[in-house]
Image (cartoon, rainbow, N blue to C red):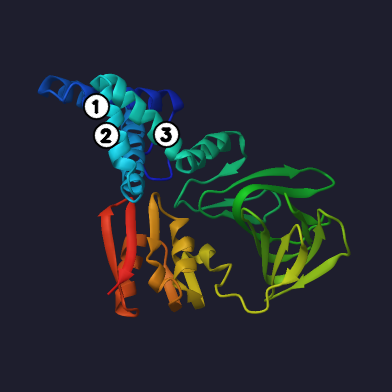
Amino acid sequence: MNTEPGAVPDPQMVRQAIDWMLRMGSERASPRLQRQCADWRAADQRHELAWQRIQAMSQEVASHYRAVPGAGQALEASAQRLGRRQALKLLGVVALLGSAGWLGRDLEQWQQWSSDFATGVGEQRRFNLPDGSQLQLNTHSAADLRFNARQRLVSLRHGEIMISCQPDSRPFQVSNRDGLFETAQGRFSVRQQDTCTRLSVTSGKVAIYPAQGGALTWAQAGQSWQLDQQGLRLIARPDMDMGAWADGLIVTRDMRLQAFLEEVGRYRHGYLGCASGIADLRLSGVFRLADTDALLALLPQTLPVQVRTRTRFWVQLEPA
């Protein structure tokens, strides 16, 4: 069991970690209780993973509530009207509800256990398929494999994949919520976002069959396409190389700073954003994904910004 950011905590261990967090707060963390908590964390690596995840959640939620005028005072007033343990439990429930999006991401990771291939946040993996083709998964992605005598099919459940397809008598297909993508040989990536799917073809050509129906469209090498409820359209001038992640890079072309930070945020836990006054600054360059903290530290060298870090899980760029 590893404790890297992409690792998935056991739900039972998470519940135990929440209980320890409440006890540590309600009993004022006596030396004896601190030793007991430390012993529990050291007894199993899964305990430590769950503890770190709950602590990260607590810090993120606290930062969000600090940013909302009056929220902290309201929570404190509620705590004063209740006993210490009851108040902490109340605040714990509020925190869990307030960070539903954060927890939802991890609940989605737990669902990935049923997938044939999956990655956690910040993790990228490469798999060799039975036909000699290669499948790469980007951060926080999941896919299923269905190979038989008639088909080669990868079902993208969420996230982003890169296919390097070897020739075969069977077509190679990728399906997802928005459509079906088919090729005989080539290299292409498919990214499922909240409201659309993006296809980028590096080599060969890919047939696009929209789930909503419509004419077959061929995507050529060097092209990027977007597919959503409104239909299919060619992305004339992408602000980012959609396949660069497979080489561990983000390559931007006159990209808005806010959009860039949203992209970097896919590879790390917690909040990453910028002040509204600098959101429209433009950025072009090649950045390595291996260390997102080091990546962010480079930005003040080319843009009039500064990096403000409250915790490792709360980072914001502000005007220099």
Reading the image, the residue beneath label 3 is 96
- At horizontal 65% and vertical 50% (from top left) the residue drawn is 129
Helix, strand or loop at mark 1: helix
- Quarter placement of the N terminus: top left
Disc 2 and disc 3 in contact, CB within 8 angstroms: no
Please state if 46 lies on the left or on the right of 109 as rendered: left
Q: Are marks 2 and 1 in contact (CB under 8 Å)?
A: yes
Tell me the tag on residue 80: 1
Is residue 241 at all visible to an observer of this figure? Answer: yes
Q: Which residue in the rendered view is the most extreme toward the right?
A: 215
* Vertical comparison of 15 with 256: above or below: above
Q: Given the image, on which type of amino acid does mark 2 rest?
A: Glu
Which label lies toward us, 2 or 3? Answer: 2
**Number of marks in picture:** 3
Residue 182 falls in image quadrant? bottom right
Q: Residues within 10 Å of mark 2 (few under 14, many from 20)?
A: few
Q: Work out which quarter of the rendered image holds the C terminus and state it.
A: bottom left
Q: Residue furthest left?
A: 31
Q: Nearer the viewer, residue 34 or 129?
A: 34
Mark 1 Cα within 10 Å, few/some/many (few <14, many 20+)?
Answer: few
Alpha-carbon neighbours of circle 3 within 10 Å: few (<14), some, or many (≥20)? Answer: some
- Tell me the kind of residue under disc 1: Gln
Secondary structure under the numbered disc 3 in the rendered image: helix
**The disc label shown at residue 76, or none:** 2
Residue 265 in the figure: left or right of residue 24: right
Q: Earlier in the sequence, mark 1 or mark 3?
A: 1
Of the pair 305 and 214, the residue shown nearer to us: 305
- Of the residues tagged 1 and 3, which is closer to the observer? 1
